[in-house]
Image (spheres, rainbow, N blue to C red):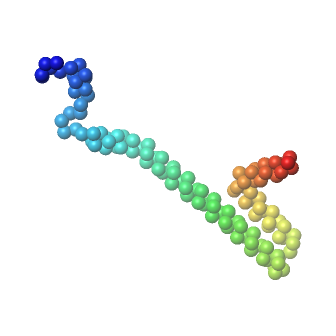
């Protein structure tokens, strides 16, 4: 090939080179700016999800603490057994509503044990 003669490939690649003063780093900044509404919204939803999970965990701990408290009240005679039964049922129902997946897993395990 003669010196100074450009091949088809070199003409093709030179057409897609960025303009002078425009580097690949600038493209990344532009991409980040264009995607900012999407990534920002996604970040907000992740934060909300994390806080909701934390709140559910705290509520389960609160219910468990209340259960312990009514057990102690029953043992010390501060409440009757009928009062204990109704409060315990309410608390256990609330706890079950918070963790529906665990109840289903326990049922599946008990069914597999019965089959064995």
User: Horizontal placement of 57 versus 111: left or right?
Assistant: left
Which image quadrant for residue 76?
bottom right
Q: Position of residue 50 (x, y in %)?
A: 55, 55
In this view, the residue in front, 83 or 1, is 1
Corner quadrant of residue 63: bottom right
Instruction: Report the residue at 84% width, 70% height from top.
Output: 83
Q: Quadrant of the N terminus?
A: top left
Specify whether 19 is left or right of 105: left
| Residue 29 can be seen in this image | yes
Left or right of residue 15: residue 101? right
Above-or-below relation of 109 to 76: above
Position of residue 6 relative to residue 113, above or below, is above
**In the displayed structure, would residue 92 be above or below residue 24?**
below
x and y, in percent, of residue 12 in the image:
25, 23
Residue located 48% across and 51% down the image: 44
Instruction: Report which quarter residue 85 is drawn in.
Output: bottom right
Above or below, comparing residue 106 to residue 87 in the picture: above
Give the percent coordinates (x, y) of residue 90: 78, 62
Residue 100 seen anywhere in this rendered image of the structure:
no
Residue closest to the far bottom:
76
Name which residue lies at 60% across and 60% down: 55
Q: What residue sits 71% from the left and 67% below the top?
A: 64
């Amino acid at each position: 090939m003669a010196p100074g003669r450009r091949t088809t490939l070199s003409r093709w690649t030179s057409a897609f080179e960025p303009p002078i003063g425009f580097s690949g780093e600038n493209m990344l900044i532009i991409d980040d700016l264009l995607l900012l509404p999407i990534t920002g919204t996604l970040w907000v939803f992740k934060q909300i999800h994390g806080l909701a999970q934390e709140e559910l965990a705290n509520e389960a701990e609160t219910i468990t603490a209340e259960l312990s408290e009514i057990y102690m009240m029953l043992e010390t005679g501060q409440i009757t057994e009928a009062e204990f039964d109704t409060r315990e049922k309410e608390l256990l129902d609330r706890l079950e509503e918070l963790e529906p997946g665990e109840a289903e897993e326990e049922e599946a395990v008990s069914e597999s044990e019965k089959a064995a």
